[in-house]
Amino acid sequence: MWYNKFQKRCRWLAFTGFVSICVFFYALLVQSIPDTIRIVAGREETFDLKVPVTGEVSGDGAEVFTNQSPLVDSGNLHIDMNDAFTLESPREGEFSIVCKLFGIFSLKEVSVEVVNEEMVVPCGIPVGIYVKTDGILAIGTGAVTSVDGMNYEPAYGVIKSGDYIKTVNREVVNTKESLIEKINRYGSKDVILGILRNGEYMDLRVSPVQTGESEYKVGIWVRDDMAGVGTMTYYTTGRRYGALGHPISDADTGTMIQMGEGKLYETKIVGITRGEKGQPGELAGIIDYRDRYMLGTVAGNSQTGIYGALNRIPSELARTDFLEIGLKQQMEIGPAKIISYVSGQRQEYDITITSLDFNNASANKGIQFQVTDQELLKLTGGIVQGMSGSPIIQNGRLVGAVTHVFIQDPTKGYGVFIENMLKLLEDF
């Protein structure tokens, strides 16, 4: 009896172990295949994924060539993705590769984007960034002291950190001053705040508290603008630019700012706080908001940085050459450089790319690197706040931008692939 139970248990354990191995193998295969591939129109691009799957090219009117012996079935081209293969398409467009295990089981569909070759100027200059929020950002709620001497929290449990206040009794508000004016105008009457929360619009009722003569408050900490120092990554032949490599986020709520309008300014670095283990360093800059120092406008804020158009080219970049864009498949583990003006002048600093993750869940952490340049390590300790957006150059191409620093080791950092940043400009 006990022997039969033992056999059943062993068979069950063997079965669950086999299933677990299959699930792990499946997940590993899926993770090894990129979600998106970009190639330049008219140019061969080589891929060596080393995954035991076949790819079936599909797409209306897709004109694709490979270096492998053409195997065509039902009008679709097949690729052995276990061997190195090249893709080439003569014109801009998009098609897909359906990846299958044993030619039967579908694993995932890879989107292939064919783009025209683009040259950009790698910048690396510090810039001052000023943006207005799209609505008034609620940081949190708090108590207010009424004329009766008691403390009340009228917005507690109603307004949440990260909400954007758009209207008061259906009247649009864009600034802190306009919000205060309208609250005071309605006095002790309940007001309906129209707010945007996680992309959903809703009306919420709040009862203002009288805190003085003709003064009423709803107990909400708010913000309607932000300013800071970052680094411009590149600009194109059409004077469109990308900067930061990561979003402008609110320090209190940790959320990406929903932007209204913004401007880019010249800035001057006046101090450097060196990075130490557990304590990120920082660049201190002065921003002059006079019109003559404005470089351009900020059109959008995204997970891979901010973007917009330049009114003029900064004098520091007047003699800088255009470089070719390096796509993900053209990158490699090994030496690279970052461009920065932290010393007060344009310099290239040595780094080593230590890891490339084409499927990183975070859009701006696909590159890992370590600073090896002794001059930069002496100056800043590694990567510091304000260097986000510094261009990463490898083999004469612009391949990415600095985005984050390792808190416990400022000599290490993350970067975003430049093709992810450039994607922002396609609809701009």
Image (spheres, rainbow, N blue to C red):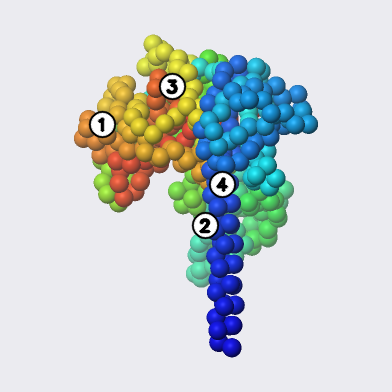
Cα–Cα gap, marks 3 and 4: 30 Å
- Left or right? Give the position of 299 relative to 333: right
Marks 3 and 2, the one that precedes in the sequence: 2
Disc 1 packing (10 Å; few <14; some 14–19; many ≥20): some
| Residue 354 x/y as whole percent | 37, 38
Residue hosting label 4: 29
Disc 3 packing (10 Å; few <14; some 14–19; many ≥20): many
- The answer to whether residue 314 is above or below residue 83 is above
Q: Which residue is located at x 51 percent, y 70 percent?
A: 150
Classify mark 3: helix, strand or loop: strand
Amino acid type of disc 2? Gly
Q: Which residue is located at x 44 percent, y 29 percent?
A: 331
Disc 4 packing (10 Å; few <14; some 14–19; many ≥20): some
Residue hosting label 3: 397
Residue hosting label 1: 373
Marks 3 and 4, the one that precedes in the sequence: 4
Judge by depth and name the residue closer to the eye, 25 or 327: 25
Marks 4 and 1, the one that precedes in the sequence: 4
Marks 1 and 3, the one that precedes in the sequence: 1
Amino acid type of disc 3? Arg
Marks 2 and 4, the one that precedes in the sequence: 4
Residue hosting label 2: 140
Amino acid type of disc 4? Leu
